Image (cartoon, rainbow, N blue to C red):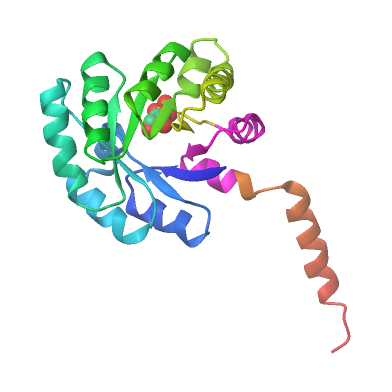
Amino acid sequence: MKIFIDSADLGEIREANDMGAIDGVTTNPSLLAKAQVRRETAIEQICDIVDGPISAEVFGTTTETILEEGRALAKIHKNVVIKVPLIIDGLKAVRQLTAEGIQTNVTLCFSGNQALLAAKAGATFISPFVGRLDDLGEEGMELVEKICTIYRNYEFATNVLVASVRHPVHVLQAALIGADVCTLPLKVIHQLAMHPMTEKGLAKFLEDAKKIPS
Ligand code: G3P
């Protein structure tokens, strides 16, 4: 399973990249606002750090405005993936962008039928939001299972990109289901590396190292 970082913060992206942990980056308007950075500036800088798919989200909600923004963003770098909301105008834009050879990530997916339509429109990635479904008392990962089954049944090439990930159990479940990608906040990437037995074992080794005759 590929791991992306879900962030627009260059410091966080460098840290995850230095760990050798990430294959790509996803951004969204909320993450850009949090990092207080212009979308185009952030995307240019991220493309200099990470060599992999970099999702840049459109702000437009009509096919025409999505296409205009998408084409301009795609010109920034060959790795830019246009992130489009799962609305009818968005699906029309995805169909056209795909025909033009531009990669897309269809975002805000909350049902199997939405994912089916995104695949039919030719999306490169589909982003089911597991954490936001969990927040409603639903099982977010069940949606990932459904989408993986649908795509497998009909051999769709669209990659399942698990988003709105909140903790390491989401990552483990996504990998067990066979999702293609999981996009994680830096905190969760760090949590994947941590284990109390590793800390405990290391403390003992360091203590014993002092007892070795020199
Ligand atoms: O990039 C989209 C997604 O990962 C958002 O996550 O935590 O805002 O639901 P969250």
Q: Position of residue 139 (x, y in %)?
A: 58, 15
Quarter of the figure with the C terminus: bottom right
Q: Quadrant of ligand 1?
A: top left
Q: Position of residue 4 (x, y in %)?
A: 46, 44
Q: Determine the image quadrant of residue 28.
A: top left
Residue 17 visible somewhere in the drawing: yes
Q: Position of residue 126 (x, y in %)?
A: 41, 28
Residue drawn at 44 percent across, 44 percent down: 5
Using residue 72 as the reference point, say whether residue 107 is left or right of it: right
Main structural element of the magenta stretch: helix, strand or loop? helix
Residue drawn at 87 percent across, 77 percent down: 211
Using residue 51 as the reference point, say whether residue 154 is left or right of it: right
Using residue 55 as the reference point, say whether residue 173 is left or right of it: right
178 falls in the magenta region: yes
193 falls in the magenta region: no
Residue drawn at 40 percent across, 33 percent down: 125
Residue 38 visible somewhere in the drawing: no
Quarter of the figure with the N terminus: top right
Residue 202 sits above or below residue 185 on the image: below
Q: Position of residue 158 (x, y in %)?
A: 43, 31
Tell me which segment is drawn in magenta. 167-191
Residue 41 sits above or below residue 160 on the image: below
Q: Determine the image quadrant of residue 172.
A: top right
Instruction: Looking at the picture, tell me which residue is in the foreground, 64 or 50.
Output: 64
Q: Determine the image quadrant of residue 124.
A: top left
Residue 162 sits above or below residue 12 on the image: above
Residue drawn at 75 percent across, 54 percent down: 198
Report how many numbered discs are placed on residues in the image. Answer: 0
Instruction: Looking at the picture, tell me which residue is in the foreground, 190 or 159.
Output: 159
Using residue 12 as the reference point, say whether residue 77 is left or right of it: left
